[in-house]
């Protein structure tokens, strides 16, 4: 649009721009890249005592959605780990002469998780333990742990889910089988890994959201309309579960209406 506008202004003619796919990909930004430096204090068993992270995020040539994304990045770095209660992160937003980067699905979070797990694997290599052992040793546990900024993590169950998946997937047995396979095969190798994480389920304070809940007096059933879009992520089910838990009724009594901006913006 910018190129067409400049050309139209210059030539005083209607301009239509048609780029091949490769040019489009070069010209349009995507996920923000980050440069990260970190300092970590840890014990010989891999227990993390303190973390200090300084990062630089490439916004590209415009602000776009970078401000909120950098906040998301910082929050996601915390993930589900204790870090000894000593956690510091600074994110420097950088304007550069590259295409403007913008929000992509789960914006900022994959980059933050990558930083966190890179630190975990770095420590694991130094202390001689597997990354999974270091993850488990530093994972937040309990029903209501706190984030580094002292926010209560209501309904926290990452530790329980981690152990359930580990048992259901027969992780220990499969790890032994993989080690045996790798020792017997020089060129073909296999691997297995488990990575816990937490992800914010709402951006109400940034984008706004709403719902209309109708309780029908005739049979006690409930119809709820919400402002999210179902694109395969299961949001209808999530909303129905929240409504059922809040009202104290059976999930089967909840019906989720079609998303409609005439009903809920």
Image (cartoon, rainbow, N blue to C red):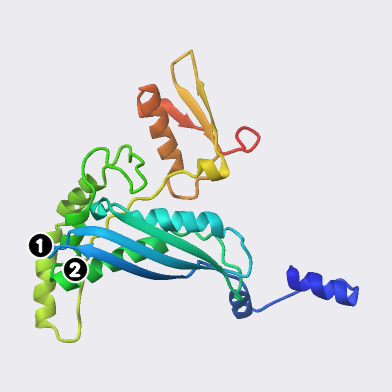
- Which quadrant of the structure image shows residue 252? top left
Residue 228 shows up from this direction: no
Label 2: which residue?
124
In percent of width and height, residue 211 lies at: 53, 32
In percent of width and height, residue 5 lies at: 80, 69
Q: CA distance from mark 2 to mark 1?
A: 21 Å
Determine whether 216 is above or below 180 in the image.
above
Query: At x 63% / y 75%, what residue is drawn?
Result: 27
In percent of width and height, residue 181 lies at: 12, 76
Query: At x 19% / y 79%, what residue is drawn?
Result: 189
Camera-nearest residue between 9 and 38? 38
Judge from the rendering whether residue 200 lies leftward or rightward of residue 138; answer left or right: right
Query: At x 35% / y 25%, what residue is drawn?
Result: 250
Camera-nearest residue between 144 and 188? 144
In percent of width and height, residue 198 lies at: 34, 50
Which element carries disc 2, helix, strand or loop? helix
Residue 97 image label: none
Judge from the rendering whether residue 104 lies leftward or rightward of residue 46; answer left or right: right
Q: Count neighbours of disc 2 (C-alpha within 10 A) and say few if under 14, some if 14 to 19, many if 20 or more.
A: many
Q: Quadrant of the C terminus?
A: top right
Camera-nearest residue between 183 and 68? 68
Label 1: which residue?
173
Q: Count neighbours of disc 1 (C-alpha within 10 A) and say few if under 14, some if 14 to 19, many if 20 or more.
A: few
């Amino acid at each position: 649009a910018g190129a067409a506008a400049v050309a139209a202004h210059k030539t005083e003619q209607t301009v239509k721009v048609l780029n091949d796919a490769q040019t489009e990909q070069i010209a349009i930004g995507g996920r923000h890249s980050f440069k990260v430096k970190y300092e970590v204090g840890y014990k010989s068993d891999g227990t993390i005592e303190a973390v200090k992270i300084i990062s630089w995020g490439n916004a590209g040539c415009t602000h776009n959605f970078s401000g909120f994304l950098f906040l998301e990045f910082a929050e996601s770095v915390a993930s589900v780990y204790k870090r000894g209660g000593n956690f510091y992160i600074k994110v420097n937003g950088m304007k550069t002469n590259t295409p403007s980067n913008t929000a992509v699905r789960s914006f900022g979070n994959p980059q933050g998780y990558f930083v966190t797990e890179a630190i975990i694997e770095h420590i694991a290599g130094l202390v001689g333990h597997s990354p999974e052992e270091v993850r488990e040793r530093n994972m937040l546990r309990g029903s209501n742990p706190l984030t580094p900024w002292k926010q209560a993590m209501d309904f926290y169950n990452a530790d329980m889910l981690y152990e359930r998946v580990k048992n259901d997937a027969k992780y220990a047995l499969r790890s032994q089988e993989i080690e045996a396979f790798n020792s017997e095969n020089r060129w073909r190798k296999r691997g297995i890994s488990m990575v816990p994480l937490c992800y914010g389920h709402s951006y109400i304070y940034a984008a706004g959201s709403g719902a209309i809940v109708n309780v029908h007096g005739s049979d006690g059933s409930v119809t709820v309309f919400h402002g999210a879009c179902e694109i395969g992520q299961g949001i209808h089910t999530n909303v129905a579960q929240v409504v059922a838990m809040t009202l104290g009724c059976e999930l089967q009594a909840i019906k989720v209406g079609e998303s409609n901006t005439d009903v809920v913006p």
